[in-house]
């Protein structure tokens, strides 16, 4: 029996076993409702199959959807059933999926007209082709852009630029993985830096403002920048040591794409307008997914891309992400997410609660939307009666840990996009992303509270 057949057999046996447990003895996890118990089993099935890769990840997404519709939906309360009929379908064509699709179209556009080559060459000209400095340059660019625009959009753009470098690196050279992993992880971390960098930050700031905390845009940067710098350096050094470059020198093939045509100008214009749309979304009121419709429509309307380009897009990645979003919907709809959060020792001391809450946020954000995690945990802790410095530290810790959960391809949209390159495996993400998450937890738990207390006194924040 081949390895792939054995893996599919393991997956089948595991799936049947978990369903049988759910239908017979149930889970020994306390007083869960029937819908929460089924959601927990779906979560366990998805987590195991995502980690082991016994079957393709996009198949797991369809399995999640099937189990939610066939098994979970009928046991939800009857009075809620009508309004929730389509709730598990919606993630499969949501704002984030449109954003992904737009990013993939831009990537195809840049590659087709050689614009990715030009940008990659620009990076190499600045770093002299030295692997360590090139890696650092990519990390810094990704993190800076993600502080101001969608980290998903940044990942899609930057991966397009780095693909030409990968083509000149042998398949067995470990540094290939370092280049690919640097982009999503730097984008994930970059979101920590500003209030608009990632949705959990915005959630945290909105609740803090309601409670009377006068935290400005600059204040947020001062609170988070030391941690951001530390984790970017940590990411750089981890990648260099786990995936060493050896004596590799980076270079790319400089293709002669001939004279610049109107199609090249159009491609650059579409790329630039899309990037501007993502930058200015907070002012125009347009979501990132809505902005992503521009390249999708324009590229095919103007003939820059054709139907063959459309068919070659990585659709499997889109469905993989949608499955993760659908799982988050199930956690919220069934109330299991709130039950998990409710297990926090809310009567413990602030420091202990900070450590436990940060750990729970890290685990939950690994397998579900970090936005949903922040939406569950932050309102709960804001209801507690703690001194202002402890409350602010607790909320900041939760927001940061939501951004540091990046151990699986489904943990964040940037991870999923990078996984679509086929240059990395799930175990590579678990290795580096897991280390960053664990170190992040330790640093935030041990250092965060003291640093933020000092900054609160220094800045005079209420």
Image (cartoon, grey):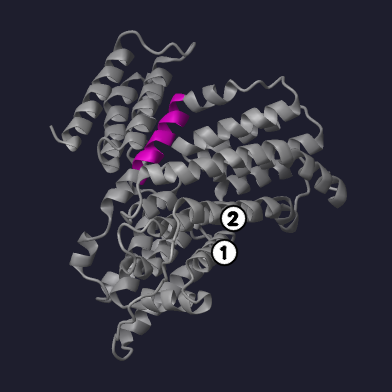
Q: Is residue 152 above or below residue 385?
A: below
Label 1, on which residue?
140
> Residue at horizontal 56%, vertical 45%?
403
> Residue at horizontal 38%, vertical 59%?
176
Residue 281 at x, y percent in the picture:
53, 62
- Is 268 inside the magenta-drawn segment? no
Disc 2 versus disc 1: distance between alpha carbons? 8 Å
Label 2, on which residue?
232
* Region rendered in magenta: 321-334
Q: Is residue 407 visible?
A: no
Residue 68 at x, y percent in the picture:
32, 29
The answer to whether 228 appears left or right of 271 in the picture is right
Q: Are marks 2 and 1 in contact (CB under 8 Å)?
A: yes
Residue 414 at x, y percent in the picture:
44, 53
Q: Nearer the viewer, residue 73 or 194?
A: 194
The answer to whether 157 appears left or right of 460 in the picture is left
- Check residue 306 in the rendering and tell me which mark sits there, or answer none: none
Q: Considering the numbered disc 1 on the image, is that residue within a helix, a strand or a loop?
A: helix
> Residue at horizontal 74%, vertical 55%?
222
Q: Considering the numbered disc 2 on the image, is that residue within a helix, a strand or a loop?
A: helix
Q: Residues within 10 Å of mark 1 (few under 14, many from 20)?
A: many
């Amino acid at each position: 029996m081949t390895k792939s057949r054995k893996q599919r057999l393991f997956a089948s046996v595991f799936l049947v076993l978990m369903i049988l447990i759910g239908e017979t003895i149930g889970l020994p996890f306390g007083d869960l409702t029937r819908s929460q118990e089924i959601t927990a089993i779906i979560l366990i099935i998805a987590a195991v199959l995502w980690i082991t890769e016994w079957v393709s990840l996009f198949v797991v997404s369809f399995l999640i959807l099937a189990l939610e519709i066939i098994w979970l939906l009928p046991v939800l309360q009857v009075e809620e059933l009508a309004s929730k009929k389509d709730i598990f379908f919606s993630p499969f064509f949501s704002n984030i999926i449109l954003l992904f699709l737009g990013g993939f179209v831009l990537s195809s556009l840049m590659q087709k007209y050689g614009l990715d080559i030009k940008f990659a060459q620009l990076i190499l000209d600045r770093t002299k082709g030295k692997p360590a400095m090139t890696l650092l340059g990519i990390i810094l660019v990704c993190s800076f852009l993600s502080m101001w625009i969608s980290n998903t959009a940044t990942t899609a753009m930057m991966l397009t630029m780095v693909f030409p470098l990968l083509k000149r690196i042998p398949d067995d050279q470990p540094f290939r993985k370092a280049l690919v992993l640097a982009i999503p992880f730097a984008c994930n971390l970059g979101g920590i830096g500003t209030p608009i960098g990632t949705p959990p930050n915005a959630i945290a700031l909105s609740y803090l403002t309601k409670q009377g905390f006068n935290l400005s845009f600059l204040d947020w940067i001062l609170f988070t920048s030391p941690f951001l710098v530390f984790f970017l350096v940590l990411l750089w050094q981890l990648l260099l040591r786990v995936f060493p470059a050896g004596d590799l020198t980076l270079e790319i093939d400089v293709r002669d794409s001939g004279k610049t045509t109107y199609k090249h100008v159009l491609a650059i214009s579409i790329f630039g307008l899309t990037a501007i749309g993502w930058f200015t979304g907070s002012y125009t009121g347009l979501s990132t997914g809505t902005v992503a419709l521009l390249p999708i429509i324009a590229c095919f309307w103007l003939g820059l891309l054709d139907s063959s380009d459309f068919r070659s897009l990585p659709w499997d990645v889109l469905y993989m992400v949608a499955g993760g979003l659908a799982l988050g919907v199930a956690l919220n709809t069934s109330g299991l997410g709130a039950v998990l959060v409710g297990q926090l020792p809310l009567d413990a001391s602030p420091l202990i609660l900070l450590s436990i809450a940060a750990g729970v946020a890290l685990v939950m954000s690994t397998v579900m939307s970090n936005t949903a995690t922040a939406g569950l945990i932050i309102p709960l802790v804001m209801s507690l009666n703690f001194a202002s410095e402890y409350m602010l530290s607790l909320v900041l810790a939760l927001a940061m840990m939501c951004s540091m959960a990046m151990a699986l391809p489904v943990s964040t949209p940037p991870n999923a996009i990078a996984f679509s390159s086929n240059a990395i495996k799930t175990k590579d993400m678990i290795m580096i992303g897991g280390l960053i998450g664990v170190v992040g937890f330790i640093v935030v738990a041990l250092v965060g509270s003291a640093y933020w207390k000092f900054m609160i006194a220094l800045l005079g924040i209420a």
